[in-house]
Amino acid sequence: MAHFLPTSSAVRVRRTVLGTLLLSVTGVTLVACSSSTPSLYSLQPSAARAGGATGYGLTSTTVPTLVEVRKPTIPETLDRDRIVLDDSGYKLDVATTDAWSAPLSAQIPHVVVADLRQRLPGTTFFVQDDATASDPQAFVELVVTRFSREGAGGPAVLDMQVVVHRADSDTARIAQSLHLTAPAAAGTEALVGALSTLLGQASDQIAAALRSLPPEPSSSTP
């Protein structure tokens, strides 16, 4: 049987085709890797408004001096890596590349603690499970049900249930249902900034609730 060696032109064609295929595969791989790298965003504390309704900076004998902010209850639809852009309808709109730098269940209570420290500088705040040498005198409990945008191009929305109470379970509890909105320009960064502002507004009301707590029962009271 006769054997035919490939001509030099055929070899060149083969090499060209193989090189093109390799470049194509490499290009697809590079695009896939670059598109899968998320942009990470973090919530930030909001500065307290001087002279606000909650009386920032004023002292009060009824305000507890050590308060624990418990980790919030957040539905799985919100507490995910990718940022939820809109959940106003039947469809959940989630960012394709923009993600949280840490879970919302960790970010939200730490931002609220930072906000409350500005609003009640005479009180020490810490997040549940953080190391502390003393027992808290009061607790702040949070349930977040909405933390996204209201439709495409709409404002940022925060729906949250807040319960503030002293460590003594027999004392009165202050419960609030908050529905807060703030303008949010287009883009994920603007949305995260607006959501941070809403946490600051929620902290305004939490600070007011802490000021409204009844005095701690005296140890001499029967």
Image (spheres, rainbow, N blue to C red):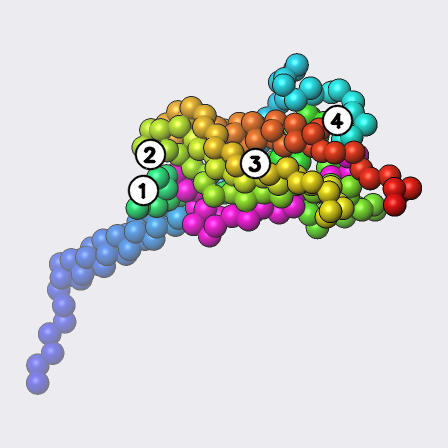
Which numbered disc flags the more N-terminal residue, 2 or 3?
2
For the point 91% across and 42% down, which residue is it? 220
Which numbered disc flags the more N-terminal residue, 2 or 1?
1
Crowdedness near tag 2: few (<14), some (14–19) or many (≥20) residues, C-alpha within 10 Å: some
Crowdedness near tag 1: few (<14), some (14–19) or many (≥20) residues, C-alpha within 10 Å: few
Which numbered disc flags the more N-terminal residue, 3 or 4?
4
Which numbered disc flags the more N-terminal residue, 1 or 4?
1
Q: What's the residue type where badge 2 is placed?
A: Gly
Write down the residue under mark 2. 151
Q: What's the residue type where badge 4 is placed?
A: Pro
Q: Element type at marker 1?
A: loop
Q: In this view of the protein, which residue sits in the foreground, 171 or 35?
A: 171
Write down the residue under mark 1. 89
| In contact (CB < 8 Å): disc 3 and disc 4 | no
**Residue 112 spot, x, y in % from top left:** 62, 35
Write down the residue under mark 4. 121
Q: What's the residue type where badge 3 is placed?
A: Gln
Which residues are the magenta region? 64-85
Q: CA distance from mark 3 to mark 4?
A: 23 Å
Side (left or right) of 195 relative to 12: right
For the point 78% across and 25% down, which residue is it? 60
